[in-house]
Amino acid sequence: MKEKDIIFLFEEIVKSASIPPFLLEGIGDDAAVFTINEKDCLLVTSDLMVEDVHFVKDWMPPFALGYKSLAISLSDIAAMGGSPEMFILSIGLPPDLGDDYIFQFKEGLKSIALKYNVALIGGDTVSSEKFVINTTIIGRAKRQRLLLRSQARIGDVVLVSGYLGDAAAGLELLKKRIKNTDWEGLIKAHLLPEPEVLLAQTLATSGLVHAAIDISDGIATDLAWICRQSQVGARVYQEKLPISSACKEAAAFLQMDPILWALSGGEDYKLLFTAPPEAVPELNKLAWEKCGKDIFVIGEIVEGNRVCLITPQEEIDITGKGYEHFG
């Protein structure tokens, strides 16, 4: 089964159990949502990183691994328009990992925890054949400003909060041990992703954004989640995909396609969101003035249930064709 099939399988547990009244959103979004009071809600999300699946120790420095393991969960809270507050860390440690490696991992984790002011409140440690890291983050959001995957509307434009494909390019450079100072930003994009916490809060506060998700598996898959939850389709225009010059240069050197990196490379951890077309000027202004960020329109929400890539030659169904964990 593919990842989405496994998720759908476990949704049966939700259907067979009684849902507590304080649960607003469960499976199907970037985080579960719990009621605190009439104005506020609690967000809870969990992420897993496994050695030789999500990272290889030969090219993933322990500091970066600690940093990234928390960054990817912070990105889920950001995608809901929330504020991260605390986290739980559980790790499986191989016996031969080494004290210095564990210390540097801790330093990376500490660095991003301090940057976003999130407190470690507990967890577990066990011995394991591979290095396994699980982070669970708890955050808070305003109920009326919550960003969900299920609120996209036909006629919305589809936007992203930065360049696509840089992280995938960085991964290829690391795998092939290629060093070039012009491409250091690509490697940093893969090793040290920056969750869009402030930008997401700004967008949520504006009240102009309808649906949102963070880009972890590539827009072909992540936009498909928005479409499924919102019961709509989407069109993405190839010529509008924001791809950095460094990414294009690296792709040419490696003889790879930067469009594929942008669509399915994954791990960009940018925001993918929808909004009415008339809101774009105000969103651009807010993103730049509050966060110094550019946002890009890449497509539109339409009727149907597919995500289609529009190229100069043809229309291609790319629904769910991002990174596949069980592919």
Image (spheres, rainbow, N blue to C red):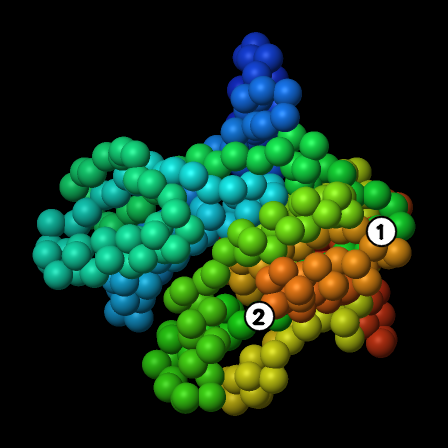
Q: Which of pointers 2 and 1 indicates the residue nearer the eye?
A: 1
Looking at the rendered structure, the number of numbered marks drawn on it comes to 2
> Where is residue 304 drawn, in percent x and y?
85, 45
Residue beneath the point at 50% across and 56% down: 195
Q: Which residue is mark 1?
A: 276
**Element carrying mark 2:** loop
Horizontal and vertical percent position of residue 310: 82, 67
Q: Amino acid at mark 1?
A: Pro
Question: What's under tag 2, amino acid-wise?
Answer: Gly
| Extreme residue toward the top, this view | 18
**Residue 93 position (above or below residue 100):** above
122 on left or right of 313:
left
SS at badge 1: loop
Q: Position of residue 167 (x, y in %)?
A: 50, 68
Quarter of the rendering containing residue 136: top left
Q: Which mark is residue 165?
A: 2
Q: Could you tell me which residue is drawn at 11 percent across and 49 percent down?
A: 95
Of residue 178 and residue 327, the one placed in the foreground of this image is 178
